[in-house]
Amino acid sequence: MTSSDKTKLQIQACKVRMGILLGTYSAKCGHPGGSLSAADMLTYLYFREMNVDPANPKDPNRDRFVLSKGHTAPALYAALANRGFFPVEDLATLRKDGSYLQGHPNMDSVPGVDMSTGSLGQGVSCACGMALGLKYQGIPARVYAILGDGEIQEGQVWEACMFAAHYKLDNLVIIVDNNGLQIDGWIQDVMNPYPIADKLAAFGLAVQEIDGHDFDQIEAALDMARATKGKPSAIVMRTVKGKGVSYMEDEADWHGKAPNEAEYRQGMEELEAELRELEAQ
């Protein structure tokens, strides 16, 4: 990827993070920490990797995305809005009465959402079904699913991995957002899932480990996944919870609470400064 391409992605990721902050601040609730950690991967998927069209969000030949950790809907909404599926201004209506942008993604009301999610462990199972269905239909589209590292404590996740490997779903990419924190603290203290990569490989997936904030590594991993035939792929991305907002980084407390006005202003000032610097390059 050229330096210009990378800068464009960094600009979009910054805008996605600003959307996350706007949504959770306006709602006075939500899940900013895990939304911010996944922002770079979502940016790459929607602005470079996936075959999607905001003008035709139900195109049967499109690539599919499933946010299995559905509580981080602010990140998905911000990516979709900046990609053109709906107005960025609508992010301020997050969780409001009458808004179509509720606390978990709803495929019946939000343009661009391919699966309603929220109950942890179920989204990746749906992604497996999508991938198998596309193969049966002979549609050469791909399916991407992002899971939380706390989410993989759910047994259903591993049933899904076994299913994906059994049916050789090489059109499926399972992405684990390994930010190390869940609502109750560090994942290794709550219910240790490590070594994540070894377990995924043991279930028959082609596994890669990357820095989830490095666009070069994201690109290389997704290229490798596309080239892998006969088995599903998994990407374990090491990330920082709350990435991009200094006071949220690596703090479990920001798993599920919104910034107050002073915190919102500080976070937006940080992101706006980053955006100005990137746009000047």
Image: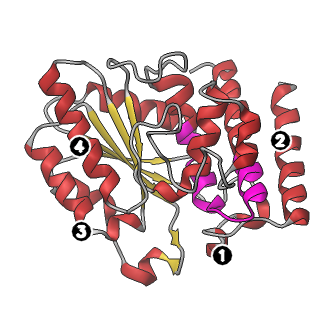
Which picture quadrant has residue 220? top left
Kindly identify which numbered label has been placed on residue 253.
1
Q: Mark 2 packing: few (<14 Cα in 10 Å), some, or many (20+)?
A: some
Check the image and report above or below for 281 versus 241. above
Q: Earlier in the sequence, mark 3 or mark 1?
A: 3
Q: Which residues are magenta?
A: 20-42
Q: What residue does disc 4 label?
A: 128
Q: Position of residue 172 (x, y in %)?
A: 27, 36
Q: According to the image, label 3 marks what residue?
A: 155
Q: Nearer the viewer, residue 274 or 72?
A: 72
Q: CA distance from mark 2 to mark 3?
A: 40 Å
Q: CA distance from mark 2 to mark 4?
A: 37 Å
Indicate the amino acid at tag 4. Cys
**SS under mark 2:** helix
Does residue 138 appear left or right of residue 42 in this picture? left
Location of the N terminus by quadrant is top right
- How many marks do you count on the picture? 4
| Residue of label 2 | 274
